[in-house]
Amino acid sequence: MRFILASLLLSLTAFTAEPEFPLTEDSKPQPGVPKGALIKENYTAKEESLFPGTQREYQIYLPAGFDKTKPAAFMVFQDGVIYQAPVVFDNLIAKKDIPPLVGIFIKPGVVPAANDKALPRFNRSYEYDSVSPTYSRFLLDEFLPAIQKRHGIQLSSDPNHAAISGNSSGGICAFMVAWHRPDRFRRVFTGVGTYVGIHGADQLPVLVRKFEPKPLRVFLQSGTGDNNLYCGDWWMANQMMERSLTWAGYDVNHAWGEGGHNAKHASQIFPDVLRWLWRDWQTNIEVKANAKGESKWKGYEVVGEGEWVTQVQNSSDEFRGADQQIFSTQDGALYLLNRGGKLYRVKDHSLSEVKTKWSGIRAAAVTQNGNLRLAVSRAENHQNADRLVTINADGDQLGNPVIIKQGTLNDAPNMRSICCSSDGATYATDWSENMIFWSRADGTVGDLRNRFTGGWGPGPQPCLSPDQTQICVPVDMTG
């Protein structure tokens, strides 16, 4: 019996053994191929960093004959040097299969131990597994500018010249950087990507289907022996991602195998992955969203197929900040109210200020007949918006202002946001009190007390239900 049982166990072990993934010649040093240089350094984040106090090792690969005076195409890797990338770069650059890339290999941050009785804090999952834009901001706004300055190199600002990659949690990290910043990265390779429920990445297959396709080229790798843990099934999650990306119209490819949760299979296919990611780089390097026109994203039924149209471009500080409002009228014009209280009109791709005798406009909305209603102040300091004014598209005042009387809980009404109903009424939220003021078409005014004590939520813009019987306002219930 013991002999039979032992034989059975040996047979099962042999049956479930992971296959070998031998490297191809492209991943091995070749005679006569010029070799790039590797620079190894450490980076310590400052206190104002998104990851303050973290220390991380990084290496930079500079291709043979690298010219520091010209912006270079580049590829970023999480977890340091993986996939035999420097050797593969040497071989494929020599064959002109890929551009002369700068490789940037970054390890996750570590906060050193505070003393000899403490342990270091390893930041890997916090940085890599999050679906927030925090790591992309760290990478693009802090780390890459710092190493460019330190090493005297120029990285291309063209997103078609930038790729990013990673394995496991580094893979989801790479995808999220490109997802949040397709204006800087458009080529992505993820090996055994962690698209599972650690910090919300299990929602990505659904989000990919709901968002307009981004201009990304994505290659996914996983295998039947990948992780299957409390937070999800990596093998199935990667397939779901590939199906969602395909459904949404992305330029996507994949390699499935029988490997486990490691970099063996990804390393074997890495040279061909690079060829696919950088194909046509010498003649046509632009990566576009839904280039084949095969997207099933339903948003096209609303916004129409094709590129977004830029209405107007303006880099002025007047249009920066969280307090801006934007709305449209029946004639197709757009209106922008900036944080300084100035109202602008966008029509036929041109921007012009709407001149009125009222300054310090605090809120604006469109009336039922296409005019504009403004919440303004009579005080010179424009601190308290206590009256409603109606103007036409040219800024001419229509009728008399409606003065909002003091509320029972408010000594100085200060309207923050307003909306208009189909019967001519206006509803306004107060800046500091939990109050809703109203003005009816017949000129009567009043207020409603908010029964919640937690205060308004962020940006308390009121809106009416479709049948105009309810007014909705976000409320902060945490107070």
Image (cartoon, rainbow, N blue to C red):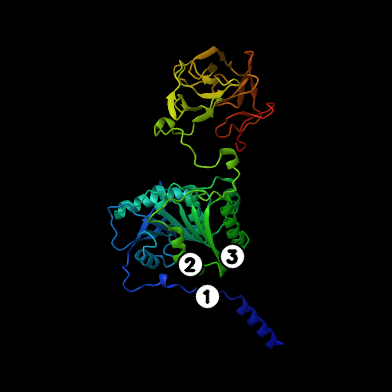
Residue 478 in the image: state x and y as whole percent: 61, 38
Q: Is residue 437 above or below residue 110?
A: above
Relative depth, front residue between 70 and 279 = 279
The image quarter containing residue 40 is bottom left
Distance between the Cα atoms at labels 2 and 3?
20 Å
Q: Which residue is mark 3?
A: 227
Side (left or right) of 79 relative to 60: right
Tell me the crowding category of disc 1: few under 14, some 14 to 19, or many 20 or more residues within 10 angstroms, Cα based.
few
Farthest residue, direction top: 400
Q: Are marks 2 and 3 in contact (CB under 8 Å)?
A: no
Specify the label residue 343 is tagged with.
none
Residue 350 in the image: state x and y as whole percent: 43, 28
Q: Amino acid at mark 2?
A: Ile
Please, what secondary structure does the residue beneath circle 3 have?
Answer: loop
| Mark whose residue sits in front, 3 or 1 | 1
Q: Is residue 113 visible?
A: no
Q: Is residue 83 above or below residue 308?
A: below
Residue 437 in the image: state x and y as whole percent: 61, 21
Tell me the crowding category of disc 3: few under 14, some 14 to 19, or many 20 or more residues within 10 angstroms, Cα based.
many
Please, what secondary structure does the residue beneath circle 2 have?
Answer: helix
Specify the label residue 20 is tagged with.
1
Q: Is residue 412 above or below residue 110?
A: above
Q: Are marks 1 and 2 in contact (CB under 8 Å)?
A: no
The image quarter containing residue 300 is top right
Q: Which residue is mark 2?
A: 269
Please, what secondary structure does the residue beneath circle 1 have?
Answer: loop
